[in-house]
Image (cartoon, grey):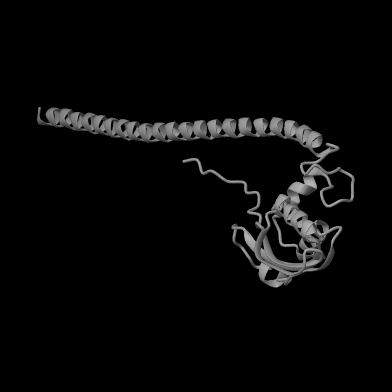
Amino acid sequence: MVKKISSKRTQIDRDQATIMAVVAVSAALTVVSIVVSRGLWNQTSYLGRVIDAQKTALGTLKTNKDSVSKLTESYKTFNEQKINLLGGYRTGDDFADGSNSDIILNALPDRYDFPALMSSIDRLLMGYSADGPSGTDDILAQAVNTSAEPVELPFSFSVDTSYTGMSQLLERLGKSIRPISITKLELSGSDESIKVDIAAKTYYRPSSGFKISEKVIE
């Protein structure tokens, strides 16, 4: 009788151990399933955000592509006008002549170019008996300039002209599409013949460059 009871207890203990093992395994599987499900959900959400960002970027790219086509046509029309922004001819040789694109580029250049500056001032002095223009070619200092702010470029020149010629020259400088600030103006001579000494400055603005940004999706 004692052996029979002991055998039943042994069987019960085994059954309980089996149940405990099943419960433990089930609990472990449940925890793993929750962790895996959470990971899959997070991954799915992340992929969704990436896809949304890609769609936005592609939409922006398509819009920019369409804008480039329209801008190209507008630029062509603008640059091929026979009469430019200054009222000069597109293909002429006078100080006010030249294509609209060249005029705009001369207005505020994005790089230091001292010879081009002297050539531009020479063009403004066309028709005058001039000494200069002259200035200091500071190419070494400007080569390491990283500022995005406009940089002053001083220059000077003198002309022998009449009072009327002086007035026309000042008017021409004032109408220059490239900003010119006169810092000194000295006159000598008579009404018939005037020597005009001018010190002035213009500017260029270093290019900030074209940057493509990256976005981290979290």
- Residue 4 lies in what quarter of the image? top left
Residue for point 71% across, 55% down: 109
- Tell which of 165 and 108 is nearer to you: 165
Q: Please state, as top left, top right, bottom left or bottom right, where the N terminus lies in the image.
A: top left
- In this rendering, would 88 be left or right of 209? right
Look at the picture and state if 17 lies above or below 184.
above
- Tell which of 57 and 20 is nearer to you: 57
- Tell which of 145 and 198 is nearer to you: 198
- Tell which of 200 and 167 is nearer to you: 167
Q: Position of residue 218 (x, y in %)?
A: 46, 41
Q: Residue furthest front?
A: 191
Look at the picture and state if 56 lies above or below 84.
above
- Residue 34 lies in what quarter of the image? top left
Residue for point 79% across, 48% down: 102
Q: Residue furthest left?
A: 2
Q: How many marks?
A: 0
Residue for point 80% across, 58% down: 165
Residue for point 83% across, 36% down: 81
Q: Position of residue 208 (x, y in %)?
A: 63, 54
Look at the picture and state if 85 lies above or below 130.
above
Q: Position of residue 53 (x, y in %)?
A: 54, 34
- In this rendering, would 150 be left or right of 135? left
